């Protein structure tokens, strides 16, 4: 199962590697990370869990946003455009402080210039919706741990916060709403491209999270993740307006420039500010998206193991039970 996952994500990432910098990333980071993902179950058969996630997703693209021009990170995000995200994951620990996680996500991101208070963006009048499919591999570093939440001496609840980073392959398919119907945009080449941009890109997941393990079997957690991508077309907007002659279809011409739909409004820029050659997007910054998710997972225990998670327990009359393990003393 893990091998199939590795093959799938490798194919996605290979399609997205279009320059030497990404090839270097493949050589120095991706391949070693995937090798660890495959090899780690051999060394950590007693520290694996499998689970699901659900939460919200949002995007930071050229579209929508607040009153000011583009701002970094979350400061240009519109909370009312938050959509659903869901996923599944498999995690295994290499040691007590480091874990490797393979995951698959589906998430919807969207944006609408009509919701912006920036007159230039409202005048552009574009919108998008994109259902992303992400396959990723991340490493987690657990920087703190306690095996007895509340200090009751029962050792029923473990708590671990962590930071994470990794790499992912992402399938993207932006669409625009027109008369109640969502039209796929990539093949329309709305910025006059000679070739449609790739539907597959690479993302770099980073973030932080935490989980509680109850009765050594059930894990409940939350994670906040930021994904920087190598694409500027998650919303189909990147560079400048193209002349109608450079766009193959009438539908593409209509969805490329929607300023005429608004007519003459005193608080909006004039229509000729959206003519061919004028700025349509910001090609100097790639798109990104974010997840905020709750998780539930079930711990898969293999070989017998030592309960050394209570090795530092205060002596309160608790009987410490130990079981032999081929792998030695290892915290749960």
Image (cartoon, helix red, strand yellow):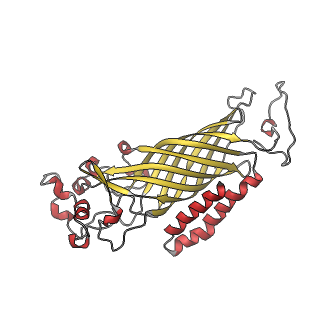
Q: Nearer the viewer, residue 259 or 74?
A: 259
As displayed, is residue 63 above or below residue 198? Answer: above
Q: Quadrant of residue 157?
A: top right
Q: Is residue 311 left or right of residue 231?
A: right
Q: Quadrant of residue 147?
A: top right
Q: Residue at x 44, y 56 (%)?
A: 288
Horizontal and vertical percent for residue 236? 34, 61
Q: Is residue 207 left or right of residue 231?
A: right
Horizontal and vertical percent for residue 249? 24, 67
Horizontal and vertical percent for residue 49? 67, 44
As displayed, is residue 302 above or below residue 216? Answer: below
Q: Residue at x 72, y 26 (%)?
A: 152
Q: Nearer the viewer, residue 124 or 244?
A: 244
Horizontal and vertical percent for residue 224? 52, 46
Q: Residue at x 71, y 30 (%)?
A: 156
Q: Nearer the viewer, residue 267 or 240?
A: 240
Residue farthest along the top direction in this orientation: 317
Count of labels in the image:
0
As displayed, is residue 265 above or below residue 294? Answer: below
Q: Is residue 120 left or right of residue 205?
A: left
Q: Quadrant of the N terminus?
A: bottom right
Q: Quadrant of the C terminus?
A: top right
């Amino acid at each position: 199962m893990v091998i199939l996952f590795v093959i799938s994500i490798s194919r996605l990432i290979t399609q997205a590697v279009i320059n030497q910098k990404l090839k270097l990333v493949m050589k120095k980071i991706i391949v070693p990370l995937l090798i660890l993902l495959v090899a780690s179950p051999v060394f950590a058969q007693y520290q694996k869990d499998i689970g699901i996630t659900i939460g919200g997703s949002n995007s930071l693209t050229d579209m929508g946003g607040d009153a000011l021009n583009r701002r970094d990170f979350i400061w240009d995000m519109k909370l009312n455009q938050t959509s659903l995200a869901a996923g599944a994951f498999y995690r295994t620990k290499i040691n007590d402080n480091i874990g490797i996680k393979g995951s698959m996500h589906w998430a919807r991101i969207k944006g609408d210039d009509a919701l912006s208070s920036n007159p230039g963006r409202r005048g552009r009048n574009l919108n998008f919706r994109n259902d992303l499919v992400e396959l990723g591999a991340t490493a987690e570093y657990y920087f703190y741990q306690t095996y007895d939440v509340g200090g009751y001496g029962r050792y029923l609840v473990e708590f671990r916060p962590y930071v994470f980073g990794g790499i992912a392959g992402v399938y993207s398919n932006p669409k625009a709403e027109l008369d109640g119907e969502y039209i796929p945009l990539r093949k329309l080449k709305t910025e006059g491209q000679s070739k449609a941009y790739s539907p597959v890109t690479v993302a770099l997941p980073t973030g932080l999270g935490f989980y509680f393990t109850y009765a050594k079997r059930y894990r409940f957690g939350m994670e906040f993740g930021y994904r920087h991508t190598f694409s500027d077309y998650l919303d189909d907007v990147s560079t400048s307006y193209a002349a109608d002659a450079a766009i193959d279809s009438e539908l593409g011409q209509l969805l490329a420039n929607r300023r005429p739909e608004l007519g003459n409004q005193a608080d909006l820029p004039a229509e000729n500010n959206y003519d061919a050659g004028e700025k349509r997007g910001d090609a100097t910054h790639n798109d990104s998206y974010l997840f905020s998710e709750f998780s539930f997972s079930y711990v898969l225990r293999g070989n017998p193991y030592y309960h050394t998670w209570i090795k530092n327990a205060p002596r309160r009359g608790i009987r410490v039970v130990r079981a032999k393990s081929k792998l030695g003393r290892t915290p749960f």
